[in-house]
Amino acid sequence: MDLDQIGRRNAGAVEHTRLKSLIAQARYWHRLHSRVSEILPANLRPYVQTACIEEGCLVLLATNNMAASRLKMLMPGLLPQLRQLDSRIERVRARLIPQPPQALRENRLQMSKAALDGFSRTARQLQHHPELAEALQKLVRRRKNTAG
C-alpha cells in the first residue's frame, strides 16, 4: 500500500504534509526498533518493544519480569551500541508493561450421540491401530462428559 499516494488523493496540501510527517515518524520508529532488536540477544527480542526517546533516555518496554530484569542487567553493556543508533540517546531505561493473560480457549464443538456412537464403534474395530483407537475412545469420553 502506497501511503504517500493515499495522502495526496484524500487530503489537501496541509493534511498531506502532516500525513507525510506522520509516515516519516512511523518509518523512523520502525527502523529504530528493528535496529535495537538486532542489538538485543535473540531470546529477548520477542519480549521488548522500543517505546520512545524522552529527554535523552531511550525507553524500552518489557512484557514480563524476566525480560525486564535481563534487559536491566544488559543495558550498561548495550548503551554504547544504542547511542550509535540515534545521537539523542544518552541513557536507557527499561519499563515493565505486562501483557494481559490470554483468554482460555473454550472448545464449543458439539457432537451428536450418533457421531459419538460411530467413533466408539470405529475405535473397537481399530485393533491393528491401538493408538488411534485410544485417541478415538478418549474423544468419545471427553465429548460425552461435556454433553451431559
Image: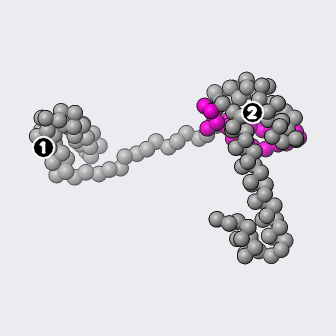
Where 15 sits versus 143, above or below? below
**Disc 2 packing (10 Å; few <14; some 14–19; many ≥20):** many
Q: Give the residue pinned by disc 2.
A: 94
Quadrant of image for the C terminus: top left
Q: Give the residue pinned by disc 1.
A: 121
| Residue 145 visible in the picture | no
Residue in the picture at 77% in, 29% down: 78
Q: Amino acid at mark 1?
A: Arg
Check whether the beta carbons of the residues at disc 1 and disc 2 lie within 8 A of each other: no
Left or right placement of residue 66 versus residue 140 in this view? right
Could you tell me residue 29's position as x and y percent? Answer: 75, 49
Q: Amino acid at mark 2?
A: Ala
Could you tell me residue 79's position as x and y percent? Answer: 80, 30
What's the magenta region?
A: 42-62
Callout 1: SS: helix
Where 123 sits versus 3, above or below? above
Residue in the picture at 69% in, 37% down: 38
Residue in the picture at 17% in, 35% down: 129
Give the image quarter of residue 70: top right
| Numbered label tally | 2
Give the image quarter of residue 56: top right
Quadrant of image for the N terminus: bottom right
Pick whichever of labels 1 and 2 is earlier in the sequence: 2
Left or right placement of residue 67 versus residue 107 in this view? right
Could you tell me residue 128's position as x and y percent? Answer: 13, 35
Could you tell me residue 140's position as x and y percent? Answer: 22, 41
Magenta-colored stretch includes residue 6: no
Q: Nearer the viewer, residue 15 or 2?
A: 2
